[in-house]
Amino acid sequence: MTTETALRFRVNGRAHEVAAHPSERLIDVLRSHLGLTGTKEGCSTGQCGACTVLVDGRPVASCMMLAADAADRDITTIEGIAPAGELHPLQQAFLDHGAVQCGFCTPGMVLSAKALLDEKPHPSDEEIRRALVGNLCRCTGYRKILDAIKAYAASKRRPQAKRAKKR
Amino acid sequence: MKFTAVGKRVPRLDGPEKVTGRTQYGADITLPDMAWAAILRSPHAHARILRLRTEKAEKMPGVLAVVTGKDFPRNDVEGVPVLAGEAVRYRGEGVAAVAAESLGQASAALAAIEVQYKPLPFVADVRQAVAPGAPKIHAESEDPELSNIAGVSKVKRGDVEAGFAKADRVFEDTFETPWVHQGFLEPHVALGEVNRGTGQVTVWTSTQAQFNQRSDIAQMLGLSLGKVRVIGLPVGGAFGGKIALCLEPIVAELARRSGRPVKAVVSRKDDFVATRPCGSAVMELKTGVKKDGTLVAFQARMLFDTGAYPGAQHGTAASLAQGPYRIPNVDVTAYGVYTNKAPAGPRRALTSPHVHFALESQLDIIAAALGMDPLRIRLKNAARKGDAVAGGLTMPYDAAASVIRTAADRAGWSPPRGAARGRGAKARGLGIAGGHWTVWAGASSAWVQVNEDGTISVVTGAINLTGTNTSFAQIAAESFGLPVSQVIAHQGDTETSPRNDGSWGSRILFAVGEAVRRASEDAKRQLAEALAEELEASPDEIEVSGGRVRAKGKSLTLAEAAERAGEYRGAIIGRGALSDLDYGVAVAAQVAEVEVDRETGQVELKRLICAQDVGFAINPMSVEGQIEGAVSQGVGYALSEEYVYDGEGQLLNDDFMDFRMPTSLDHPEFDVALIEERKDKGPYGAKGVGEPPLVPTAAAIANAVYDAIGVRLRELPMTPERIVQGMRRAS
């Protein structure tokens, strides 16, 4: 049997050292070793997006990444996008627009949207749809999810628009 | 009447936990000293089990217990075994299960289970199954003329032959729909544990129906209901796929044998292959019409694939086959037919989407032949109050025509311009379809407790799939005149809540919601009785509203009243229980606008306009969410979702890459019109909303495709390949 290896991860801004078996995936480190069960496993083949986390800011299917490949990188899970007890405004937008039903796709969906918005604060509708194409949702038909993301992006635009006017 | 809490857009109260990833689904739960289970599955579509030995597996490292079908006092529920008996009847059927210290050890031990199979001839589809000389999957057939019949449902009214004799034209068409998975993202999961002192089994499971499961598990394990506790967990999607037993008796029995808590999670592949997907159908329709489009006779013979064991919803199909239309002479026969596939189970709206795809497609075929506007033929025949629909039921009020007209008006309906609307490389088309669903109450109950601080706790045993707990809070808040924030609605388990049938059939808000309303009124009545002496008034003179208790100029806050009532009488717990509300007939109509690429056969859905009689939208945001989600499932059913089998009965597309559900790129522009007649028996005139919107979608899209390119597709899904083939046949 192959022995476990000590791997270092930076998860949600905190350093962790985990003794992981070489066959373990990033999702196993997050869920089993660190108890971060907000990352969901829907298909184990990278096709549903429920396990999406951010690795160095980019969305990754954590069921498809070996733990060793994620070592020494910066990982953000759903638990890490807002301080405990608070909601990120994007999460709030999901609630306000009825974008959450069963909730199983929601953490991955929020993280894919966040990755897009971090890179491109004012995406077009088409860009939003493309950014979410790897995240399946069976409950909502996607419309309310897109509405939530658009509303959040628009709320970020307003203060800038005001500033522009003042100038 | 002006409402303060119902009829408002209230975000789901469980939303914050879900959006932060804190909701604990089954896979997120770890019990102390927990073992893991794995299931050995049949590699054959049909075989006799000659020998099944588990001794070697029992000695494998880490193995704690092994069970087979023989280890259960009763091995089936309604004819569906949980682990195979003498034979396996589909690829993926469970044969044995192992509990071990780790999932790896449990999986490794499966290879040490010795099974000797004798392969048998198998049946791949329903046409083959009913043919003379077909291999028999079960010894008995419910029909003397046909092989492999699991059940028959018939609906007869009037004299169909006399109707055909009176008809000016008679149309005969055959339609087919595929096997599909419900498509929930959370795979089946369950945990079991046994209390060694009491012998009580506790099962945690992702289920739509915890009380029904309690009774099923108790039967299988030979225990009384009190010895089985089922805790319904948050459900990561179900859509009918989490009603039947799956893992529950297995983890329970493994826990009994190993003395340890046991957890099992179904892999995505096994969830596709071996749970309870929705079966296919072959539907032959014969419809007689007058020249003016009046429907006079309707005959249907339909085969529903139930897979290896009973489960096809042929009864619903027979009952709903005529659609929301007035047809005086009806003769429908629907069969459930055995084949060597996974046993069929319910999917949102059961077989109503199947039969409406057939009927609503044929209505357009008839309209085209008569030179009629498809909208007009529907309005002309729309069932009115008192007309017979849905088996023996009648329309409780006029709704069908107004729902269909609303969808058409909002879509800017224009009659077809001939065979096809466009001549270019991309052709646009509009299609309309209606549909209906009946909502039944079933066992429904609720407790409403007035807490000493004047807040309200609602407890039901209804699984909160669609945000019904939020609506329950709204209903109780309305009853007491409180803000929704003063009410908490809990989902209890089988030991901590009153009995409820499962969350199916769009019944929860309709029936359990009414139980919550009645329980709230009962709690108010108890408060009034408790405080009558203090307020020097009779209970009838005491009013509980606006968060206060008032009588003859005296007034207490709800907190004061609850505190004192508690001192005088103990807890104030209102009770609401019912099972017999009048059914609701829910009509939905949709218009689809598509663009078909003549080169590739690709259908792009541009717009979907949905109109639905919802009774009353307690939470309009939630109702819209139900409609949009159901329609999205209908889009997948129409265009891309389909189980594909090879010649050996093996499912070829057992993952999300090849079983193609709609993505964010496939969602159309939705327009949702809620029609609120408020005439139904649910709370404040509400009725169920979750199933009806899936019913017309596939037909509306098929009709739009015909409008665009003049090609009629009688088989779902309408893949690019089928569209191109259809165009070739037409030219």
Image (cartoon, helix red, strand yellow):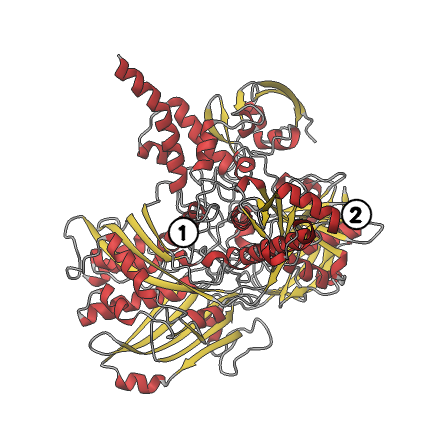
| Residue B403, quarter of the rendered image | bottom left
Q: Chain of mark 1?
A: B
Tell whether label 1 touches label 2 (CB within 8 Å).
no
Q: Residue at x 30, y 19 (%)?
A: A162
- Give the SS element for disc 1: helix
Q: Nearer the viewer, residue B578 or B108?
A: B578
Picture disc at residue B59: 2
Q: Residue at x 54, y 68 (%)?
A: B121
* Left or right relative to B579: residue B373: left
Disc nearer the start of the sequence (2/1): 2
Marks 2/1 same chain: yes
Separation of marks 2 and 1 at Cα, in angstroms: 53 Å
The disc labelled 1 sits on which kind of residue? Ile
* Left or right relative to B204: residue B146: left
B386 above or below B11?
Answer: below
Q: Which residue is mark 1?
A: B627
| Residue B332, quarter of the rendered image | bottom left
- Give the SS element for disc 2: loop
Q: Chain of mark 2?
A: B
How busy is the neighbourhood of tag 2: few (under 14 within 10 Å), some, or many (20 plus)? few
Q: Nearer the viewer, residue B495 or A9?
A: B495
Residue B31 in sight: yes
The disc labelled 2 sits on which kind of residue? Lys
Q: Residue at x 48, y 79 (%)?
A: B132
Q: Nearer the viewer, residue B24 or B429?
A: B24
Residue B646 in sight: no
**Residue B699: x, y in percent?**
33, 60
| Residue B319, quarter of the rendered image | bottom left
Q: Residue furthest top?
A: A167
**Residue A61: x, y in percent?**
50, 33
Q: Nearer the viewer, residue A137 or B426?
A: A137
How busy is the neighbourhood of tag 1: few (under 14 within 10 Å), some, or many (20 plus)? many
